Image: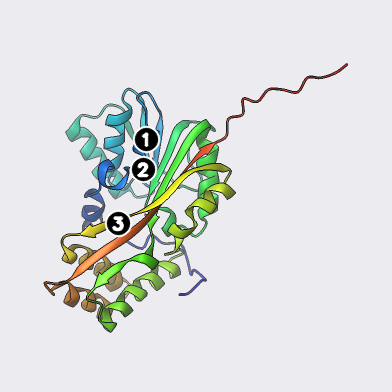
Amino acid sequence: MNPTPLKENYTPGHTANALSFMASRDLESHGFFLVPLLQPGFDVLDAGCGPATISADIADAVFPGKVTALDISTSELDQGRRLVEGREIVNLELVAGSAYKMPFPDRSFNVVFSLDLIEHLSEPLKALREFHRVTRPGGFVALSTPDWDSIEISPLPMALGRAINAYRDLEERNGGNSRAGFHLSEWLIEAGFAPLSNGEWTQDYEEPKQVAEYLGLQLETAGLFHHATALRDWARDPAARFRQSWKYATGVRASTNKRRKRVME
């Protein structure tokens, strides 16, 4: 792995393939660890919302509370707006912005949620401290991102192993961290949150061609055509199987309502 990023760049890109890949996610499948933290009336931020499919489900869960969905990509926000209009969701607002400097006042949200964002950031702690800033005292944070050290792929020919490592190297060069999932809990503590829970879960892709094409297009864009070919060749094998490991962590921002010390005159 190359530990020195050349720049920060969102590795998946904002292609139609990437949008379709992200849009298949919902609250039940990718945000189940968030559900226990939600209550009707809560104000929630979905940071790095993508096409806002999970944001829309959160809006249903916290109504009449409000959900704010933040993303830096206008194309993904446009798809999210079409979703909002189609489902007639009245308590979801989509906002363009960076996780490093969000356009919200301090203590704006009861819950801050982020899925599959932290691994793409060159300064994850800077973003998490921003999450802390906008979380209300007693409020929660919930994060999840893939753990590339624990993926299960079969069969695993040498060419495919090299292709997966090439993708991880590409993510590192773009400023990300393919091991971010391993660090979520410690980063939350460093950002000022008290830990609540952490764990892992597995996403088993029923159609390996879907994930092969998703990763292959990113490698192709970087000029790594032979690695993209290795992924597509592997996906044609009827025995092909891809199981993605994810890590999640939740935390709470400590309440500031502490009893003041009595002043003795």
- Tell me the kind of residue under disc 1: Pro
Disc sitting over residue 36 in the figure: 1
- Tell me the kind of residue under disc 2: Phe
The answer to whether 263 is drawn above or below residue 132 in the figure is: above
Element class at badge 3: strand
- Residue ID for mark 3: 202
Choose the circle earlier in sequence order: 2 or 3: 2
The answer to whether 117 is drawn above or below residue 95 in the figure is: below
Disc sitting over residue 33 in the figure: 2
Tag 2 and tag 1, C-beta contact below 8 Å: yes
Task: Find the distance from the CA under tag 1 to the CA under tag 3.
Answer: 19 Å
Task: Find the distance from the CA under tag 2 to the CA under tag 3.
Answer: 13 Å
**Which residue occupies the extreme top position in the image?**
265
- The quadrant holding residue 238 is bottom left
Q: Residue at x 40, y 51 (%)?
A: 199
Element class at badge 2: loop
